[in-house]
Amino acid sequence: MEKPDITMEPLKSKSVVTNISYAVLEKTLYSVSTLILVPIAVKQLGMDVYGIWVLYCSLAAFFLLAQFGLSTSFERFIAAYRASNDHEKLMRVVATSFYSLCVIAIVIFAVSALCAEHVISWFAGTQVSRYQELLFIWFMGINAVMLVNQIFMAVPRGYLRYDISSFIGIAARLVETGLSIAFLLTGSGLAAFIWGLGASCVISTCAGFWVTSRTLGKWPIAPRMFSGSMLLELYRFGIYTQASFFAMWASANMDKLIISRLFGSYYVGLYDIGTRIPLLVRNTFSLIFAVLVPRASELFATGARNTLQRIYRHGSRYLAILSSAAAALLIPTAGSILELWLRKPADRLEIFVFQAIMVGVAVQLTAGIGSSVIRGVNKPYFETIANTGMALVNVVFSLSLCLLYGMNGVAWGTVLSLVAGTIFFEVLVNRELQVDQSSFFLTDIAVPFLWSLACTVAGVFVFPLLCSRFFMDVSPVMALAASVCVYGAALCGLTAVFYRVIGYVSLGEIIGVFRKKIL
């Protein structure tokens, strides 16, 4: 029987720029909702209880590592089989992944439920109540269902239709945020987060399954489509990213677990507040290069190596410009931004963590394009090697520096691991893509960061003067907001002029991207 033409299915591919736009829109909404939710949670719960919730999230992320990188292979294989018009293998990918994730989710939920009391009590440094233990078990149950939903959400992304997955994500996030705030204000405590996340899980899972059914057939998870050989193929790709998963978890959560054990949940809350905005910046920027994985896979399949090199070099350059500029904007204004966000003077620890993590995030983001390209060309073990080293360095440095310098040392341990892991990974990618090492680091990376370093040093002296000398006739909140905006506008203007004068960026190339002529 003739195979159906996948290009005639309801999901027709969108351009990379369109996918980036929708993905950034989703992440922007997520960032804004988080900025709204966190101060309300801290006010209603107190920093100690909020720190317990942060501990829940860190432990849940650890238990979810048991999928061993399976979910990272979905988009890549769906995009490849769609490009080759192989409908049967598409069905096998979805069915095999679904049943495999169901088994993994059940195991994760069972183990986390059995270990909940002992694990939470050990990291919290005190005995937790039965109520808090039950909340964690419910939380893990919701996360298990969301793990299974990853295969459904991967279908539109594999078809290069991030607009659909973004719309679902936006709807789910709005419901989650609205319900969480409502229950927080009515005094539900930590259960407010559970109700909001549960509703979000139901919406995204039902919508994801509906989209998958419309695309691949009425019942895309038929048991007869399960394939052991397909599962091995998926794991053969995904297992290499397990170290990346662990490294991401370690860089985002190891600090909090160390602080929770040594200093208590109150300081976990403070530390989390300091990392929130830098990590939101990283997550938002990551969408710019995450959508390149299917495109890189297509280019690799067609042998367009020169195009891959151009995307890698030019994309890394522009990403370095954006990430370093973000650091130059946020580091001098960290205290003011936290005060505007929390509506109270920021703690010195929060400010220090904010500034330190922002340095590491800015450097780490420069490897984003290389990460997507390497995944697209089926070489995920490059990330495995680099991220394994980064995770080990993070654990060793964070623990060692914590003993020497307290919580400030924990932050510096994370920063050093991010910088070391990023540089090592970029060296590996350059060798694979046959890119000149010195040209890449000196031209594409060093120039933006040296300029942003100069801007940051100037900003440390200029921004306080801007706050104290201008906007004296308005309220303190408006004065801080106006100062940040003026400083940001001046920084952006000077940066644009600088790069234009030295001929570092091509306006025609940027226009070509948005006119869909390059990507």
Image: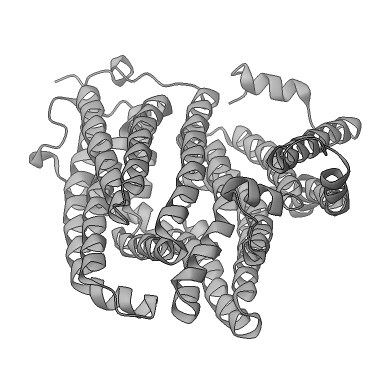
Q: Is residue 54 visible?
A: yes
As drawn, is 47 to the left or to the right of 128?
right
Q: Is residue 366 visible?
A: no
Q: Nearer the viewer, residue 473 or 508?
A: 473
Q: Residue at x 16, y 32 (%)?
A: 220
Residue lying furthest left: 224
Q: Residue at x 86, y 39 (%)?
A: 470
As drawn, is 52 to the left or to the right of 98?
right
User: What is the x, y in percent for residue 396?
Assistant: 56, 79
Q: Is 125 placed above or below 174 here? A: below
Q: Quadrant of residue 519?
A: top right
User: What is the x, y in percent for residue 77?
Assistant: 35, 40
Q: Nearer the viewer, residue 382 or 401?
A: 401
Q: Is 484 placed above or below 244 here? A: above
Q: Nearer the viewer, residue 173 or 399?
A: 173
Q: Is 304 placed above or below 392 here? A: above
As drawn, is 192 to the left or to the right of 96?
right
Q: Is 159 placed above or below 364 here? A: above
The quadrant the N terminus occupies is top left
Q: Quadrant of residue 58?
A: bottom left
As drawn, is 117 to the left or to the right of 402?
left
User: What is the x, y in percent for residue 264?
Assistant: 46, 76
User: What is the x, y in percent for residue 203?
Assistant: 25, 34
Residue lying furthest bottom: 403
